Amino acid sequence: MSFLEHLDELRSRLFRIAIVFVVLLAASWAVSDRILAFLMVPIREHLLVGGDIIFIALTEPFMVYMKASAIAALFLSSPYILWQFWGFVAPGLYKKERRAGGLFMVLGTIFFVAGGAFGYYLALPITARWLLSLGTQFKAQLTLQAAFDFESRMLLGAGLVFEMPIVILVLSRFGIVTPAFLMRHFRIAVMVIAIAAAVITPSGDALTMAVFALPMIGLYLLGVGFAWLAARPAAEKPVSS
């Protein structure tokens, strides 16, 4: 296809993604109170005695309910988003590589959801407990917007970070990176991971950065393992005499 045809294909796929996302957003809005109550648990359970989550702007509850619905819709639509992405790049792949589309969608969804679960059940409780414990001599009155923005960055950041092994796997299949290349630049990768952890974490404190950075290093090494598995079939092909 020509460049304009590629752009038209991309526009078509983005439009389909938008339709699915809006439908799931509307469905999530119907139960947005339950979604928000669930999302606020890791922060609420670590509030100090007498502390509470309040709102000070008239539109604050509406905006937060909408954002909570959007996060739910994003996680629910992630398989379809990944499938559309694969459908866009698949025509440029070999037939054997195109067969990996289902595996890409399944693994991408699993890792994205696993990242969100890591953020909700591990990263957020640890950081919320630590940050709130610093204010023991004060009375906590968190605004709804501030509390939700903190949590949403943690959840989405963790979801995206957990896609690292899948990205490395795809790059290795395209021949852009190799296991040897990844391990040779491991120190640079650790430095980049530390910078990324500082950008993702809302507070920027050392504990929160470590909570993100250490799993990211593990995910990078897992990606190296994926790259090794992707490169192995090509390396094991018999040499013709």
Image (cartoon, rainbow, N blue to C red):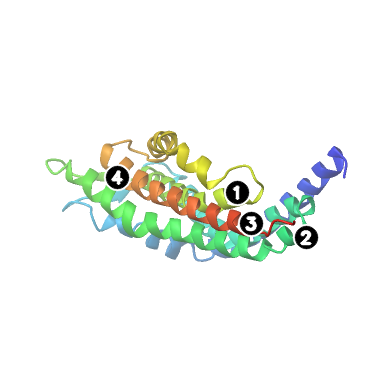
Q: Is disc 4 surrounded by few (<14), some (14 to 19) or many (20+) residues within 10 Å? A: some
- Residue labelled with disc 2: 95
Callout in the foreground (2, 4): 2
- In the rendered image, residue 65, in percent from the top left (x then y), is placed at 48, 54
Question: What amino acid type should be assigned to the residue bearing mark 1?
Answer: Ser
- Residue labelled with disc 3: 82
In the picture, the quarter occupied by the C terminus is: bottom right
Residue at (37% x, 39% y) in the render: 202
Residue 67 in sight here: no
- Residue labelled with disc 4: 142
Q: On the picture, is 141 further left or further right than 89? A: left
Callout in the foreground (3, 1): 1
Give the Cα separation between the discs numbered 3 and 1.
Answer: 18 Å
Residue 207 in sight here: yes
Question: What amino acid type should be assigned to the residue bearing mark 3?
Answer: Leu
Q: On the picture, is 175 further left or further right than 70? A: right
In the picture, the quarter occupied by the N terminus is: top right
Give the Cα separation between the discs numbered 3 and 4.
Answer: 36 Å
Which residue in the rendered view is the most extreme toward the front?
Answer: 241
Callout in the foreground (2, 3): 2
Whichever of labels 4 and 1 marks the residue nearer the N terminus, that label is 4
- Residue labelled with disc 1: 172
Question: What amino acid type should be assigned to the residue bearing mark 2?
Answer: Lys
Question: What amino acid type should be assigned to the residue bearing mark 4?
Answer: Leu
Label pair 2/1, CB-CB below 8 angstroms: no
Q: Nearer the viewer, residue 28 or 121?
A: 121
Whichever of labels 3 and 1 marks the residue nearer the N terminus, that label is 3
Callout in the foreground (4, 1): 1
Give the Cα separation between the discs numbered 4 and 1.
Answer: 45 Å
Whichever of labels 2 and 1 marks the residue nearer the N terminus, that label is 2
Q: Is disc 1 surrounded by few (<14), some (14 to 19) or many (20+) residues within 10 Å? A: many
